[in-house]
Amino acid sequence: MSTVNSSLQKLRQLAPSLNQAADNAAKVVQEVEALLTKELNLGVESGVNVAWTNVTPKKTRFLQLCHRRVNGKFRLAVVEATCTSFTDDDNTLAEAWKDDDVTPWAECPRDVKLKTFPALPMLLQTLIDKVEETNAEVEKTKQTVREILGMPKTATNVNPIPSGGYPVPAGAQPTPNRAPNLVEPPPRDL
């Protein structure tokens, strides 16, 4: 009986720190979600696998932490998904994914929050990678469309327009209220 009492006493000592850890995790996720959705307005989906279980030799169930749309708004969410492996018509191994459950992280049970919270840094890194990839794809597509339309490529050798309103060639110093590299008329005698 003393072992049980000792164990219960230890749990009484540990419970407050666990409760505090869960509260701290919730605050961090709330701050990150606000940053991603309100301040940065990313609008980019990404996710990481937290855990998985083989249900059958060809079916695996995944627990994922994601940044994705939930009821029309981007949120940090926990997704339970099933992946089924199969051989397609070309005799190539393929996969079919099905989201079984999508829940905003803030609405998940505490055990799921605590299980998925350690994956947050990895999710943030995948978001960084996805944003960089998306930016590169947009730039490449923009250049391709400009070429198709016969438009000149975006100038890369011109500095941003200074307050005087004229673009400044790379390496030149802007002159306030004057157009750079324009010939000034000779002074006139009055």
Image (cartoon, rainbow, N blue to C red):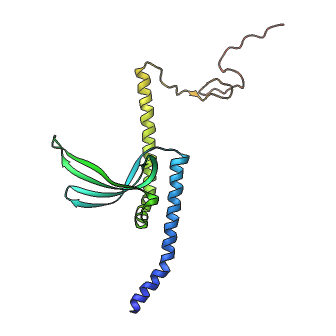
Q: Residue at x 78, y 11 (%)?
A: 187
Find residue 70 and report its horizontal and vertical position in percent.
42, 50
Q: How many marks?
A: 0
As rendered, which of 178 and 104 lies closer to the eye?
A: 104
Residue at 53 percent of width and 52 percent of height = 34
Query: In the figure, 21 relative to 84: above or below?
Result: below
Q: Residue furthest right?
A: 190
Residue 165 picture location, percent across and down:
66, 24
Left/right placement of residue 88 relative to residue 112 reads left
Q: Specify the quadrant that holds the N terminus.
A: bottom left
Where does residue 188 sit, x and y in percent of width and height?
Answer: 79, 8
**Quadrant of residue 110 within the rendered picture:** bottom left
Specify the farthest residue to the front: 71
Q: Residue furthest top?
A: 190
State the residue in front, 40 or 138.
Answer: 40
- Quick check: 113 above or below 86? below
Q: Which quadrant would the C terminus be assigned to in this image?
A: top right
Q: Is residue 107 above or below residue 20?
A: above
* Residue in the picture at 67% in, 20% down: 179
Give left or right: position of 87 versus 131: left
Which of 65 and 125 lies nearest the eye of the viewer? 65
